Image (tube, helix red, strand yellow):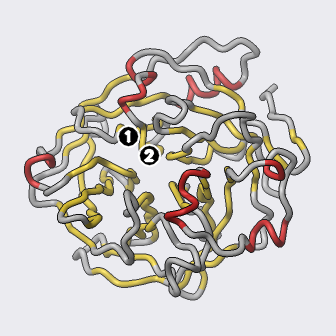
Amino acid sequence: MLLSCFLFSDEIAVKEIPLKGLITDRQQEISGMDWYGNNLFLLPENLGGFLFVISKDDIYQSINSNNPNPITPNQISFITPDYSKTIPGFEGFESIAFFGDQFVVTLEAKSDGKMHGYIAWGKINPKTLKAIINDEDLLELPVPTQVKNMTYESALIHENSVILFYEANGKNLRKSAWQHIVSLNDNHSARIDFPNIEYRITDVTKIDHQNKFWAINYLWPGDIDRLNPAEDLISAKYGKGETHQSSKAVERLVEFQIQNGAIHLTNQKPLQIQLLEDNSRNWEGLVRLDKKGFLIVTDKFPGSLLRFISYKSK
């Protein structure tokens, strides 16, 4: 039977999916992930020329085992322009999202003392899984406000468009927390309304048949000064789990829905992740695992960690 994680006072403990190989090098700094068919793609932030790939079968073997063997992800060729030369102040990739045999990535840069956000389009070979982005397939989108090291951390494919999520949407930073929505047909950009939500949004799942999706909502205590959070209305409504009551850190998943041309928080209770006693995990990638729950991954803090969250919607 599938092993489920324990529930602790409205918090969920994550189950380790052990890894080995290059992905365990913190310098790979995983910044996003998404499914392409039955393959889980993990995106390193840096220009290494490859993506990490893990099969769904390997994921299930791991979470169904009491003593799983570490997984060594495959490294698939990722051909891109040399953005370190073509984008001033290029800092890295931030997210990836697939649609058919195509995908988008978001990119982050800092130049002239300001943050800059970009989106690029690519294609994947369904046989070899080789991913390619051409030089001309790049678009800069101005960030809605200037916060150090914060740009477009997530991408969501919806119908014939991609929604880019700026990661800082708190009430004290943005009166109107709209997001960019870009047509996949002609690159036309518009805005879609989004609720003010404190802390950071660091990745989102694919959207489901009800136009619902989940997002990572994360706070590292060291970011409090630059995020200047207002009252956390989610905690005020639903309360805090046991470990969250004694920590400034926040690690949770929240559910959204697109309705009437806008994005709204649903009435679904957030999933609070049981915190570590003495450290904070910078969760950067999120996907659903069928109807079993979620897979979630960190960048390099406190290491490259892939975890399973057991959850069935009620």
Q: Are marks 2 and 1 in contact (CB under 8 Å)?
A: yes
Q: Quadrant of residue 142?
A: bottom left
- At 40% from the left and 53% from the top, the residue drawn is 97
The quarter of the picture where the C terminus appears is bottom right
Query: Considering only order in the chain, which callout, 1 or 2, is on the residue closer to the N terminus?
Result: 2
The quarter of the picture where the N terminus appears is top right
- At 58% from the left and 88% from the top, the residue drawn is 260
Q: How far apart, in angstroms, are the residues tagged by discs 2 and 1?
A: 5 Å
Mark 1 closeness class: few <14, some 14–19, many ≥20 residues within 10 Å: many
User: On the picture, is 29 further left or further right than 195?
Assistant: left
- Say which residue label 1 marks: 43
Q: Quadrant of residue 41?
A: top left
User: On the picture, is 94 further left or further right than 114?
Assistant: right
Q: Position of residue 80 (x, y in %)?
A: 17, 44
Q: Position of residue 119 (x, y in %)?
A: 27, 62
Which element type, helix, strand or loop, lies under badge 1? strand
User: Is residue 181 among the parts visible in the rendering?
Assistant: no
- Say which residue label 2 marks: 32
